[in-house]
C-alpha cells in the first residue's frame, strides 16, 4: 500500500532517520511510538508529502488515496462545516467544483464536459458525498444546524471533530494521524476507537494514549536508533512481551527452549484475554499473527517511579462539606460533599476541566472556595502535582539544588543521593546539572514526580499527570500508582490510567457530586449514571 525506501532525514548534524526501508500494508493499523523528539511527527509529515526527506522515497500504490488529519484547528475557518468535510477528498472536491463552475457558465460545449465529469463523479460516489459527510458529522455530535455554519463560528472542540470527520471522509486507503486523541473528549475518543477498530484500510497513527493504541492497533511501529521496526500486536503486547524478553536476557542459566516456551505461554494467555474483550472480532486478525520470533528485548529505559509513604494514614483522610466555586459567573461545582476512605483511589472527573483544577487548588490551600469547607485527617501527608507547575521553576538552580529543597534528611541533602535519585528519573550525569528553568514540559513533570517521591506522602493528588510525558514515563507512572498503598485523587484524560488506577469515581457538577465505587469504564458505560449526568449538568441552581 505505502512503501518507504532508503529514507534518511538529517537536521544539521542530527540524524533522525538512517536508510529506513519499510512497508505499510492494507488492513493494518500501525501505532507509531518513540521517545520525545525521535522523529514521529517528522515521519508522518514526510509520508504525507508535507516535508521532503534528506534522501529516499515514499511510494503510495497507484490509484490509492491518502488522508491526513489536519493539525491546525483554524485551517478551514473560511469554509462551511459540511464543505470542510467534503474537502477531505481533494480529487472529488475538485471535480465537484469544476462541475459547479461549468454549470454557472452553461454552453453546449460545457454540457459535454459536464457529462464527462459527472461520470467520474458518479464513480467516486460523488452523489452521496454530502449525505455521507452529514452522517459522519452527526455521528461525531455536530448537529445538523451547524452543517452550513462557517468553521470560524464553531468552538475549539467542535472544530476538532469536524477535522476528524474530514480525515475519515470517503474511507481513505491510507489514513494518517498525529496524536488524534489529544484534543478530543472521552466520548469522541471512544467513538474513534470503535470506528478505527472496524476500519479495513491502512491507518498510521502516532499516539501516547495506551487505551487507544490497544483498541485500534494491529502493529506497533517503534522508532529507535534512526530506524522503524514493526511488531505485530497492540501496545500492551509490545510492552509486556519486550519486558519479558529483557528479563529473559538477564537469566543466563535458563535454556533457550524454556525461554521460548515461556514466550509462547505468554502469547497464549495474552490472546485468550484479547479474545475475551469487546474488541475481539475486529482485532482477531491481529492475535492470529503474534509469534515468538518477532519479540525483541526492550532497549527502552523506564524511569523508576516509586511512591513510598512516610507512614500509613489513619482512618480520617479528607472530609469535604458543601464546597462550591465559580469562575466568571459560571458555577464550576457546588454542594460537593466527599468523605474519603483509606485506600480510595478516586478518579475526580468533570465535563469542565476548570472544575477539577479549581477543586485541587482549593483542597491544597492555593485558592479559596466560595462556600463550604474541607478538613484533612491529622495523619495525612499530601503531595500534589498541579496542572500548571511553572511556579516551581522560576528560579535559576541546577536540578540537584532544585530537588534538594525537598530533602527530608541529611542523607537526602547529599549530592550523591540527589544525583542517584535524578539518575533513576533518567537525568543522568551532566543532565543533573541542567538549569531547572530551561527544562522541557516532560522534564519538568519528571522533576515534579521526583519531588513527590521525596515527600513520601500518603495522599497523592494528580491533575492531568500524563501531560507532556512520553509513553515510557506514562507506563512507569501508571504502574507505580497501581501499586501505591495510600490514597489517590486523580484527574486524567488518559483512559488507561483512569481505568487501571481508580476504584471510585467522583464527578463534580454544578449541582453536586455523583460518587460511585466502581471502575471508570463501568461508570462511563452505566445507563442510569448517564441519565443522571445529563440532569446534573443541565440545570443551574
Ligand atoms: N525543520 C527542522 N529543523 C531542525 N530540527 C527539526 C526540524 N523539525 C524537527 N526538528 C527536530 O527533529 C526532532 C524530531 O522532531 P519530531 O518529529 O517533532 O519528534 P516527535 O514527534 O517524535 O516528538 C526534534 O529534535 C526536533 O527539534
Ligand atoms: Mg510529535
Image (cartoon, grey):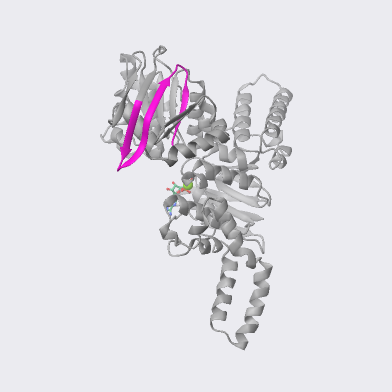
Q: Main secondary structure of the magenta part?
A: strand
Front residue (pair 376, 371): 371
Relative to 93, is 388 above or below?
above
Look at 64% across and 21% down and name the residue there.
252
Regarding residue 445, the answer to whether it shows in the image is yes
Relative to 539, is 156 above or below?
below
Look at 66% across and 66% down and name the residue there.
124
Front residue (pair 478, 106): 106
Regarding residue 7, the answer to whether it shows in the image is no
Residue 395 image offset from top left, x and y in percent = 25, 34
Q: Quadrant of the N terminus?
A: bottom right
Residue 9 image offset from top left, x and y in percent = 51, 52
Front residue (pair 425, 256): 425
* Image quarter of residue 276: top right
Q: Is residue 404 left or right of residue 531?
A: left
Q: Is residue 363 left or right of residue 190?
A: left
Outermost residue toward the bottom in this view: 108
Q: Is residue 342 magenta?
A: yes
Residue 465 image offset from top left, x and y in percent = 43, 33
Relative to 257, is 294 above or below?
below
Residue 251 image offset from top left, x and y in percent = 63, 21
Relative to 99, is 382 above or below?
above
* Image quarter of residue 363: top left
Look at 31% across and 22% down and name the residue there.
406
* Image quarter of residue 65: bottom right
Q: Is residue 187 magenta?
A: no
Look at 58% across and 55% down and name the residue there.
136
The magenta segment is 322-351
Amino acid at each position: 500500500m505505502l512503501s518507504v525506501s532508503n529514507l534518511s532525514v538529517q537536521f544539521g548534524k542530527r540524524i533522525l532517520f538512517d536508510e529506513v526501508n519499510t512497508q505499510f500494508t492494507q488492513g493494518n493499523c500501525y501505532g507509531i511510538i518513540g521517545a520525545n523528539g525521535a522523529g514521529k511527527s517528522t515521519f508522518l509529515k514526510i509520508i504525507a508529502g508535507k516535508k521532503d526527506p534528506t534522501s529516499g522515497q515514499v511510494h503510495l500504490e497507484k490509484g490509492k488515496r491518502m488522508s491526513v488529519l489536519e493539525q491546525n484547528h483554524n485551517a478551514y475557518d473560511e469554509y462551511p462545516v459540511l464543505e470542510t468535510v467534503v474537502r477531505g477528498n481533494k480529487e472529488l472536491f475538485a471535480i465537484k467544483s469544476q462541475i459547479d463552475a461549468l454549470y454557472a457558465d452553461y454552453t453546449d460545449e460545457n454540457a459535454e464536459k459536464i457529462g464527462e465529469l459527472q461520470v467520474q463523479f458518479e464513480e467516486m460516489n460523488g452523489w452521496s458525498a454530502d449525505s455521507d459527510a452529514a452522517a459522519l458529522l452527526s455521528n461525531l455530535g455536530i448537529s445538523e444546524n451547524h452543517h452550513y455554519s462557517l468553521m470560524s463560528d464553531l468552538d475549539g472542540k467542535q472544530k476538532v471533530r469536524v477535522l476528524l470527520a474530514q480525515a475519515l471522509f470517503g474511507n481513505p486507503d491510507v489514513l494518517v494521524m498525529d496524536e488524534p486523541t489529544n484534543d478530543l473528549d472521552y466520548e469522541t475518543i471512544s467513538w474513534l476507537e470503535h470506528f478505527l477498530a472496524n476500519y479495513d484500510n491502512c491507518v498510521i497513527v502516532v499516539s501516547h494514549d495506551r487505551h487507544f493504541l490497544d483498541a485500534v492497533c494491529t502493529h506497533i511501529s517503534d522508532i529507535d536508533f534512526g530506524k522503524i521496526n514493526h511488531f505485530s500486536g497492540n501496545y500492551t503486547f509490545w510492552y509486556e512481551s519486550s519486558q519479558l524478553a529483557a528479563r529473559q536476557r538477564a537469566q543466563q542459566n535458563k535454556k533457550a527452549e524454556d525461554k521460548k516456551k515461556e514466550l509462547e505461554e505468554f502469547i497464549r494467555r495474552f490472546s485468550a484475554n484479547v479474545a475475551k474483550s469487546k474488541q475481539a472480532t475486529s482485532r482477531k486478525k491481529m492475535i492470529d499473527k503474534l509469534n515468538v520470533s518477532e519479540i525483541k528485548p526492550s532497549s527502552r529505559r523506564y524511569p523508576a517511579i516509586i511512591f513510598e509513604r512516610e507512614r500509613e494514614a489513619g482512618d480520617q483522610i479528607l472530609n469535604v462539606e458543601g464546597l462550591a466555586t465559580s469562575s466568571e459567573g459560571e458555577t464550576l461545582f457546588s454542594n460537593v460533599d466527599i468523605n474519603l476512605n483509606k485506600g480510595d483511589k478516586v478518579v475526580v472527573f468533570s465535563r469542565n476541566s476548570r472544575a477539577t483544577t479549581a477543586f485541587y487548588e482549593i483542597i491544597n490551600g492555593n485558592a479559596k472556595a466560595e462556600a463550604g469547607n474541607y478538613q484533612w485527617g491529622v495523619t495525612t501527608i499530601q503531595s500534589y502535582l498541579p496542572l500548571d507547575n511553572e511556579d516551581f521553576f522560576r528560579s535559576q538552580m541546577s536540578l540537584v539544588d532544585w530537588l534538594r529543597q525537598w530533602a527530608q534528611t541529611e542523607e537526602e541533602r547529599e549530592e550523591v543521593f540527589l544525583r542517584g535519585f535524578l539518575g533513576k528519573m533518567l537525568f543522568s550525569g551532566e543532565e543533573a546539572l541542567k538549569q531547572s528553568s530551561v527544562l522541557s514540559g516532560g522534564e519538568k513533570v519528571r522533576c515534579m514526580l521526583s519531588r513527590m517521591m521525596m515527600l513520601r506522602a500518603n495522599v497523592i493528588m494528580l491533575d492531568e499527570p500524563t501531560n507532556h510525558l512520553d509513553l515510557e514515563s506514562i507506563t512507569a507512572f501508571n504502574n507505580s500508582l497501581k501499586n501505591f498503598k495510600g490514597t489517590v485523587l486523580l484527574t486524567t484524560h488518559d483512559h488507561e490510567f483512569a481505568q487501571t488506577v481508580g476504584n471510585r469515581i467522583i464527578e463534580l457538577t454544578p449541582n453536586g457530586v455523583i460518587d460511585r465505587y466502581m471502575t471508570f469504564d463501568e461508570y462511563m458505560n452505566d445507563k442510569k449514571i448517564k441519565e443522571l449526568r445529563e440532569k446534573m449538568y443541565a440545570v443551574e441552581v
